[in-house]
Amino acid sequence: MPHPGLSVRVGCLEPYGLTITEGARILGVTRQALSQLVNERSDLSWDMAIRLSIAFGSNPDQWMRMQFAYDSAKAEERASTIIVKPVKLVLESAYQ
């Protein structure tokens, strides 16, 4: 699952020939904020999703579904490394 920043770069900036600086100015954010998103170093926020939707004619929910799908895929990759004891087992061992 691709990071939403890739979609911002390929689907929003590149078709219009916009640089990060120009895109940031249009979106009303810092160059650093947009650069971090496009370079997959930060997550997409609801605020940015709204800005992208207004600027490029999309829907904030679509953007956030991309972020959710990306986050879900990354979590699934890490699932086998997450160590948690079921509450039932913890409680049972506490009373034995």
Image (cartoon, grey):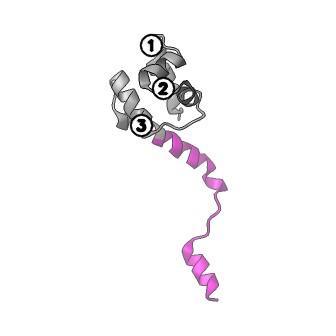
* Residue ranking furthest to the top: 17
Asked if the residue at tag 2 contacts the one at tag 3, i.e. Cβ–Cβ closer than 8 Å, the answer is no
The residue that appears at 36% across and 38% down in the rendered structure is: 61
Specify the segment rendered in magenta: 68-96
* Sequence-earlier tag: 2 or 1: 2
Secondary structure of residue under mark 3: helix
- The one nearer the camera, 36 or 91, is 36
Whichever of callouts 3 and 2 sits on the residue coming sooner in the sequence is: 2
Q: Is residue 16 shown above or below 73?
A: above
Taking the spot 55% from the left edge, 74% from the top edge, the residue there is 87
Quarter occupied by residue 74: top right
Mark 2 surroundings within 10 Å by alpha-carbon count, few (fewer than 14), some (14 through 19), many (20 or more): some
Q: Which mark is residue 15?
A: 1
- Three-letter amino acid code of the residue under disc 1: Pro
Residue at left 37%, top 23%? 55
Q: Amino acid at mark 3?
A: Asp
Query: Residue 15: x, y in percent?
Result: 45, 13
Q: Is residue 44 above or below residue 34?
A: below
Find residue 47 and name its label.
3
Q: Farthest bottom residue?
A: 96
Q: Nearer the viewer, residue 76 or 8?
A: 8
Q: Quote the CA–CA distance across marks 2 and 1.
A: 11 Å
Is disc 2 placed on a helix, strand or loop?
Answer: helix
* Disc 1 + disc 3, Cβ < 8 Å: no
Residue 30, position as x, y percentages in the image? 52, 27
Q: Which mark is residue 7?
A: 2
Q: On the rendered image, what quadrant is the C terminus found in?
A: bottom right
Q: Secondary structure at mark 1?
A: helix
Predominant SS along the magenta part: helix
Q: Amino acid at mark 2?
A: Ser
